[in-house]
Image (cartoon, helix red, strand yellow):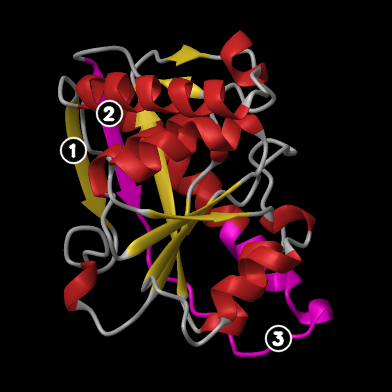
């Protein structure tokens, strides 16, 4: 976890490059599978008429970056060193970077995203980043969706017994050759130009979906069987 405390820009860039190389290699060893509860919004996203903002918990960002990065997608990350370390992997996968914090207003970042000349079609956001609370959706992602017309796609990610860093989010790193699973939910449409007072129902809907899909993905990774109802009942018990 000491690497996450690096502050020297040159060391951060070097650590980012080393991390990216290692994580791409790790990703190739994983036994990966995905499931879409709605339309295919990962590999088929360029064929769909809609634009999307993908909602991924901060500690689960590694796998989606490796599997589905592309030049049509930008990632909103923190300006802190941990975000810059992830930035090396994001650049390696050909994606764009937007530096800022969706949970703390992120005025400059949001201004970039909502401009008509924003160069990326889709966006990925960690709704609980960059400093938490862990797995708690902040309203920033709803604001972005309302101002851009992007539909929010909740994404659940599960690993079989991953390593965990001693960070605020307990960032997860899958073990080589282990099972890794992703579950994409139905896109959530947010009305345009919502007022702050009207965002809470959409934030709560996204929170529910993120919790539900993450539970399904983790059970799928642990058992190796796709049985979503059984997975949810087991979690509830």
Which of the two discs, 1 and 2, labels the residue nearer the N terminus? 1
> What is the C-alpha distance between the residues marked 2 and 3?
36 Å
Left or right side of 136 for 21: left
Could you tell me residue 104's position as x and y percent? 78, 55
Could you tell me residue 227's position as x and y percent? 26, 39
Left or right side of 14 for 82: right
In the rendered image, the residue lying farthest to the front is 10
Badge 1 marks a residue whose secondary structure is strand
Badge 3 marks a residue whose secondary structure is loop
Q: Which residue is mark 2?
A: 180
Q: Residues within 10 Å of mark 3 (few under 14, many from 20)?
A: some
Could you tell me residue 39's position as x and y percent? 24, 69
User: Which span of residues is magenta-colored?
Assistant: 178-206
Q: Is residue 72 visible?
A: yes
Q: Residues within 10 Å of mark 2 (few under 14, many from 20)?
A: many
In the rendered image, the residue lying farthest to the right is 197
Q: Is residue 199 magenta?
A: yes
Q: Quadrant of residue 195?
A: bottom right
> What is the C-alpha distance between the residues marked 1 and 2?
7 Å
Q: Residues within 10 Å of mark 1 (few under 14, many from 20)?
A: some
Foreground of the two, 211 or 136: 136
Left or right side of 95 for 236: right
Q: Which residue is mark 3?
A: 194
Look at the picture and state if 237 lies above or below 136. above
Badge 2 marks a residue whose secondary structure is strand
């Amino acid at each position: 976890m000491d690497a996450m405390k690096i502050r020297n820009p040159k060391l951060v860039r070097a650590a980012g490059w080393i991390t990216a190389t290692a994580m791409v290699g790790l990703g190739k060893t994983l036994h990966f599978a995905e499931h879409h509860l709605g339309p295919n919004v990962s590999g088929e996203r360029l064929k769909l008429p809609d634009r999307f903002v993908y909602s991924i918990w901060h500690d689960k960002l590694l796998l989606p970056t490796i599997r589905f990065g592309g030049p049509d997608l930008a990632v909103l990350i923190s300006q802190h060193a941990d975000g810059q370390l992830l930035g090396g992997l994001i650049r390696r996968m050909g994606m764009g970077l937007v530096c800022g914090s969706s949970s703390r207003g992120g005025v400059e970042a949001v201004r970039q995203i909502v401009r008509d000349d924003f160069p990326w079609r889709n966006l990925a956001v960690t709704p609980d980043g960059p400093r938490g609370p862990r797995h708690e959706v902040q309203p920033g992602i709803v604001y972005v969706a309302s101002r851009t017309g992007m539909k929010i796609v909740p994404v659940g990610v599960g690993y079989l017994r991953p390593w965990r860093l001693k960070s605020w989010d307990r960032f997860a790193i899958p073990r080589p050759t282990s099972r890794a699973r992703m579950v994409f939910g139905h896109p959530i449409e947010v009305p345009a130009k919502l007022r702050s007072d009207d965002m809470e129902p959409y934030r709560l809907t996204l929170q529910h979906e993120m919790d539900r899909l993450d539970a399904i993905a983790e059970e799928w990774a642990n058992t190796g069987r796709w049985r979503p109802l059984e997975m949810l009942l087991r979690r509830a018990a």
